[in-house]
Image (cartoon, rainbow, N blue to C red):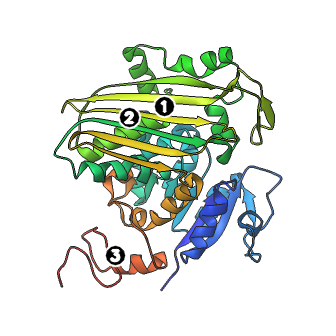
Amino acid sequence: MRKITMVQYGCGKMSKYTMKYALEKGIKIVGAFDINESIIGNDISTIIEDIKPLKVKIQHADKFEEFLQTHEVDIAIITTTSLFSENYPIYEICARNGVNAISTCEEAFYAQNSNPSLAKKLDKIAKSTGCTICGSGYQDVFWGNLISVLAGATHKINLIKGKSSYNVEDYGISLAKVHGAGLSKEDFEKEIASVDNISEKEREALIKQGKFAPSYMWNVNGWLCSKLGLHVISQTQKSIPQIAEKEIYSKTLEMTIPKGYCTGLSAVVTTKTKEGITIESQCIGKVYDEHEFDCNDWTIEGEPSTRVVIERPSTVELTCATVINRIVEVLCAEPGYTTTDQMPENIYKAYNLDKYLEIADCCDCGCHHDDNHCSCHND
């Protein structure tokens, strides 16, 4: 049985876990790429830590496409920035070369409602070469499939309301800056909040031009509507600064955030649908003080109403484990830019991932498989 081969693109904080988890699920890492000159040439074991050298050195990102053209690669794991447009050149390289890819980019989770032009372009290229490109991570389970599963136990839904918080220190400098961490109130209004202080017509124009900057929940609400078969009438977002009540030091920004400055933001997205269901979701990303912790809090109001609260989720590790567990579904998915609302729910993979692919190769139904049989068959 041939092992699944993988390349890691982006060797920052997240890659420590994506590479560790991949190796532990029987995946062979054949390449790693980054733009940080200080780590180029290092063995990937220096990122993963506590393992012997693996004889895979981190290469400069400008060698990525050449590597894909000269090596057998099943999938690329991309852990870089949060905006679809910023990651698009990487996705296109994968698509042009017929290499499947899964990204932790939050907008890539459902870019159809924030950058439809690039989404369609990527979809066309990936279909032409027979590969699948998608986004996944924490939101795939905790803001997506968790909610859709709860919805499946509900007779009537009036409102879906969610709130999730995370420490931007855990994700690197790019994410911290996108959240406005370290900015004054005035600079936050100019650089972050002003994006949302526009009319619906102006927002639609920006989306059409590929210049809209969505909060994470913008794409999550679109994903949920697609998953639940809802039709969007309107969608708005608002960014609210989170203000430091005292000085807070940020290791990621390498600065002390003064009292009265921004530690991050709260982004609230409200979606109204033709079916009468409203989705109101909020993500709070900030530099935490010593008393704060991650929390995921969702309520479905209807008949019956249900609330689920998860305190102190290991957000980074959960993000990376979700991505690795998603590899089988990505390799079995329809070619194109295929978002995870079009895939089965993510499930725990108890065995090496190549075992699940071996079972899937014997069946064209696209369903979940356990150790012994295809779940859509009774024999």
At 51% from the left edge and 64% from the top edge, which residue is drawn?
A: 324
* Residue 294 position by quadrant: top right
Q: How far apart are marks 1 and 2 (CA)?
A: 9 Å
- Disc 3 and disc 2 in contact, CB within 8 angstroms: no
Q: How far apart are marks 3 and 2 (CA)?
A: 31 Å
The one nearer the camera, 45 or 96, is 45
Numbered badge on residue 214: 1
Q: Mark 2 points at which residue?
A: 113
Q: How far apart are marks 1 and 3 (CA)?
A: 36 Å
Amino acid type at mark 2: Asn
Q: Which of marks 1 and 3 is nearer the N terminus?
A: 1
The one nearer the camera, 372 or 128, is 372
Q: Which of marks 1 and 2 is nearer the N terminus?
A: 2
- The number of discs equals 3
Query: Element type at marker 2?
Result: helix
Instruction: Please state if 41 lies on the left or on the right of 135 as rendered.
Output: right
Q: Is residue 338 shown to the viewer in this render? A: no
Q: Which of marks 3 and 2 is nearer the N terminus?
A: 2
Numbered badge on residue 360: 3
At 50% from the left edge and 56% from the top edge, which residue is drawn?
A: 102
The one nearer the camera, 374 or 311, is 311
Quick one: quadrant of the C terminus?
Answer: bottom left
